[in-house]
Image (tube, rainbow, N blue to C red):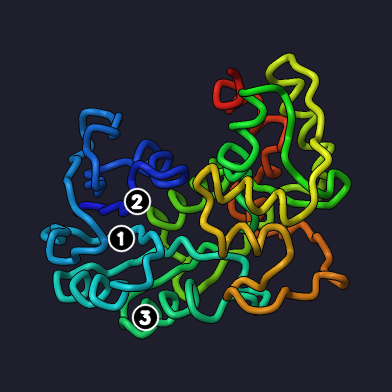
Amino acid sequence: MTTLVTGATGNVGRLVVRGLTGPVRAITRDPAKADFPAHVEVVKADLDDPDSIPFDGVEKLYLFVHPPTAQEVVDRAVRAGVRRIVTLSSGAVTYGYDTSHHLPVEQAVEASGVEWTHLRPGEFAANKIDLWGPSIRADGTIVHPEPDGFGQPIHEADIADVAIRVLQEDGHAGRAYNLSGPPQLTQRDMARDIGAAIGRDLTFQDVTVDEALAYYVSVGWPEEIARYILGIAGYEGGEADDFSDYEYVVSPDYEKLTGKPYRTFAEWARDHAADFRG
């Protein structure tokens, strides 16, 4: 039976597709971006158009969260015979910051009556490509107002490792796995690791939060998400969440599932050096 992967050309989805064994159907809006092994069936479809998604013969579904049509996608999948859904959700659900984006999709999946597992990663290291990449490539600088502020980014390959395992193994039904990433780093630490990967000394621009926000939006980052990243709005777009008591813990779920530690940010930077070179 086939495993269907939505968001198949995304940062995590493309790794899931490449790591799965057996029949795989990769769903993407732009098949020209798909570069997968010969055994992968690439289909042009869109989560905005659930009728375009071919669920025939599909047993397992890797579901990228897209709230507007999630209920319809899940309903169609279940009617077609899908028996296991693995959801790419968010650690924001675990900590109560997300009640209107990832959470309703989790709830739709849980109410479907089929086996389900949620993956709840924290901060994606890959966000740095869009946030920092343009200025690093241009002049070796970084636009961020708090160089000594902390973060805990996770390598997308760690998320994919878990997705592949829970799609192909039994024993994960009804569980939500928190994928925190390795121990916390400052933004300055991350800049050092990227600089080492590309052989370039990087510096932070002296910017205010508002100036950083304007810059992030100018390079294509959604304003509501940029506000959350900068700590000037909550996840739902309202008032900023209070992170004063937030503890950057390392969730044990990844190591328990895979038997290995999280990949470091330095390793991620080396893997993505080409994204930061001019």
Q: Quadrant of the C terminus?
A: top right
Q: Secondary structure at mark 1?
A: strand
Q: Is residue 208 left or right of residue 98?
A: right
Of the image marks 3 and 2, the number of the one nearer the N terminus: 2
What residue is disc 1 on?
Answer: 61
Q: Quadrant of residue 69?
A: bottom left
Q: Secondary structure at mark 3?
A: helix
| Residues marked 1 and 3 touching at CB (< 8 Å) | no
Mark nearest the camera among 1 and 3 is: 3
Using the numbered discs, state the Cα–Cα distance from disc 1 to disc 2 in whole angstroms. Answer: 11 Å
Looking at the rendered structure, the kind of residue marked 2 is: Gly
Measuring 25% from the left and 70% from the top, which residue is drawn there? 73
Q: Residues within 10 Å of mark 1 (few under 14, many from 20)?
A: many
What residue is disc 2 on?
Answer: 7
Using the numbered discs, state the Cα–Cα distance from disc 3 to disc 2 in whole angstroms. Answer: 18 Å
Asked if residue 79 is positioned above or below residue 266 in the image, the reply reads below
What residue is disc 3 on?
Answer: 108
Looking at the rendered structure, the kind of residue marked 3 is: Ala
